[in-house]
Image (cartoon, rainbow, N blue to C red):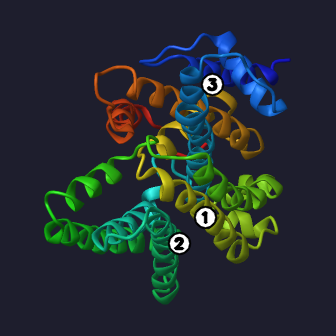
Amino acid sequence: MRRAGPLLALALLAIVSLSVGKYGVPAREVFAVIGAKLLGLASGVDPTAQTVVLQVRLPRVAAALVVGGALAAAGATYQGLFRNPLVSPDILGVSTGASLGAVLGIFLSLPVWAIQGLAFLGGLGAVGLVYAVGAAVRRHDPVLTLVLAGVAVGAVLGAAISLLKVLADPYNQLPAITYWLLGSLAAVTLGDVGAILPAILLGLLPLWLLRWRMNLMSLGEEEARALGVETRLLRPLFIASATLITAAAVSVTGVIGWIGLLVPHVARLLVGPDFRRLLPAALVLGAGYLLAVDLAARSLAVIEVPLGILTALIGAPFFLWLLATARRGWS
């Protein structure tokens, strides 16, 4: 029953998100609309309420659940690999690469599906470049090499984004670029969620099947090898899985920061560092966190607040607290 508690709380939050907004829909009508949709029957609910639930809020709720859980799972993976609770999915440049791909698509006035595709490929390509640089620069500590390569590649990609913003049309392209970089679920459809779901599940599969090995990987390079873990094979696999998850999520929502940093650490405080418990906890907490932030983003003000702003306002103070209280070692 205790294990079902977080899932029940998440389901309750999803119902609240479907009900609450500038056009309120009672919970009973939400159940009637969704039940009728699943059974192919008439709901008897006002058509406006049906449209709000099915076409406006349901895609946002589904996207928040999938993307929030995905980013938190990727963050937990990166933190375990790099043995540092201050690491996020941005450490290897995946978000910056995805941003460059999307900005390029907007700059070229491509359709939405092409922008999303470029964002996805940009995220994968950035991490591939970081890993190639790390492999070319042979040092004793491969983790440190990857981090330094990620910083350097991220800086170059960030400069390219800035250049495209300077060259973009200030009346049409630049506002679209800025809005995308702040992150939002406003334009996400169920089709978008369905398009990224296979990639996210494919990335989660090896993390789930090999979650017990992540505990050994987090002990360090030498210790993991001494225990029989082939780190040269597992590290690329875990990085590729986390990168695939992050790139797929970012490609449809834009950059939503701090989830990959904040949520895994909270999950670790609640369930401990054992990745077998940490991964499902991060998935549930990440889904609920983004769902709550999205509800606040569309309810607190007259205009919708971009998600990246709210997650930064919440995450930055937590990050400062984390810096002040974090222990020296990894646990």
Q: Does 182 sit above or below residue 45?
A: below
Picture quarter with the C terminus: top right
Q: Residue 45: horizontal and vertical position, in percent?
A: 66, 16
* Visible residue check, residue 144: yes
Q: Which residue is mark 2?
A: 124
Residue visible at 36% across and 41% down in the picture: 308
Q: Residues within 10 Å of mark 3 (few under 14, many from 20)?
A: many
Q: Residue 232: horizontal and vertical position, in percent?
A: 68, 77
Front residue of 189 and 103: 189
Is label 2 in a helix, a strand or a loop?
Answer: helix
Q: Which residue is mark 1?
A: 244
Q: Residue 260: horizontal and vertical position, in percent?
A: 51, 46
Is label 3 in a helix, a strand or a loop?
Answer: helix
Residue visible at 64% across and 12% down in the picture: 27
Picture quarter with the N terminus: top right
Determine the CA span between mark 2 and mark 3.
31 Å
Residue contact at pointers 1 and 3, CB within 8 angstroms: no
Q: Residues within 10 Å of mark 1 (few under 14, many from 20)?
A: many
Q: Quadrant of residue 219?
A: bottom right
Determine the CA span between mark 1 and mark 2.
7 Å
In this rendering, which labeled residue sits more in front, label 1 or label 3? 3
Q: Residue 229: horizontal and vertical position, in percent?
A: 78, 68
* Visible residue check, residue 218: no
Q: Which residue is mark 3?
A: 14
Q: Residues within 10 Å of mark 2 (few under 14, many from 20)?
A: many
Front residue of 284 and 320: 284
Residue contact at pointers 1 and 2, CB within 8 angstroms: yes
In this rendering, which labeled residue sits more in front, label 2 or label 3? 3
Amino acid beneath label 3: Ala
Residue visible at 67% across and 62% down in the picture: 199
